[in-house]
Image: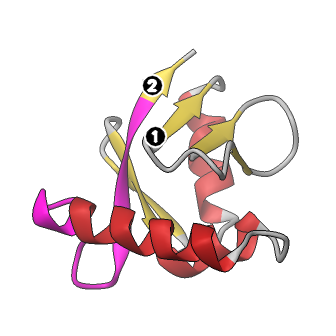
Amino acid sequence: MIIRIDSAPGIQLIEQADLGKFKAVVDVAENVLAQRIRETNGSLEMEGNVAVWVSRGWLLSQSGPSLSSGWQDEFDKMIVAARRHGYVDGRDRIRAHIERS
């Protein structure tokens, strides 16, 4: 799963079926990034300039209804693994490191 923030409006979730990677790919200036994050009304939150905390609810809402129950099981496993490594906080948000493109 990739959170894509670029010149397109809004924030896109792409490659939803690939649960083996989780990151935010950013290709906008810092001020644009900050504005886009604010527009999510708390669903995404910056951690300095190195990571984005993403609510589980936002991820599920952006993944679409076409994803199978098998996908949901794999998503839940991804969350469990992320939690073991400290990448899920007490508000059930998942930490996505930022890659600049």
Q: Is residue 40 above or below residue 1?
A: below
Amino acid tagged 2: Glu
Amino acid tagged 1: Lys
Q: Disc 2 designates what residue?
A: 99
Instruction: Please state if 88 lies on the left or on the right of 33 as rendered.
Output: left
Residue at the spot 87% in from the left edge and 36% down from the top edge: 8
Given residues 72 and 46, the one toward you in this image is 72
Q: Position of residue 52 (x, y in %)?
A: 41, 51
- Of circles 1 and 2, the one toward us is 1
The crowd level at tag 2 (other Cα within 10 Å; few <14, some 14-19, many 20+) is some
Instruction: Tell me the quarter of the image containing the C terminus.
Output: top right
Query: In the figure, residue 5 lies in which quadrant?
Result: top right
Mark 2 residue element: strand
Residue at the spot 35% in from the left edge and 44% down from the top edge: 51
**Count of marks overlaid on the render:** 2
Gap in angstroms between the C-alphas marked 1 and 2: 7 Å
Query: In the figure, residue 60 lies in which quadrant?
Result: bottom right
Furthest toward the top, the residue is 101
Residue 28 seen anywhere in this rendered image of the structure: yes
Q: Position of residue 75 (x, y in %)?
A: 48, 67
Q: Disc 1 designates what residue?
A: 23
Instruction: Please state if 98 lies on the left or on the right of 32 as rendered.
Output: left
Instruction: Please state if 74 lies on the left or on the right of 37 as rendered.
Output: left
Q: Position of residue 88 (x, y in %)?
A: 26, 69
Furthest toward the front, the residue is 70
Instruction: Please state if 37 lies on the left or on the right of 12 as rendered.
Output: left
Query: In the figure, residue 90 lies in which quadrant?
Result: bottom left
The crowd level at tag 1 (other Cα within 10 Å; few <14, some 14-19, many 20+) is some
Q: Which residues are magenta?
A: 83-98
Residue at the spot 26% in from the left edge and 71% down from the top edge: 80
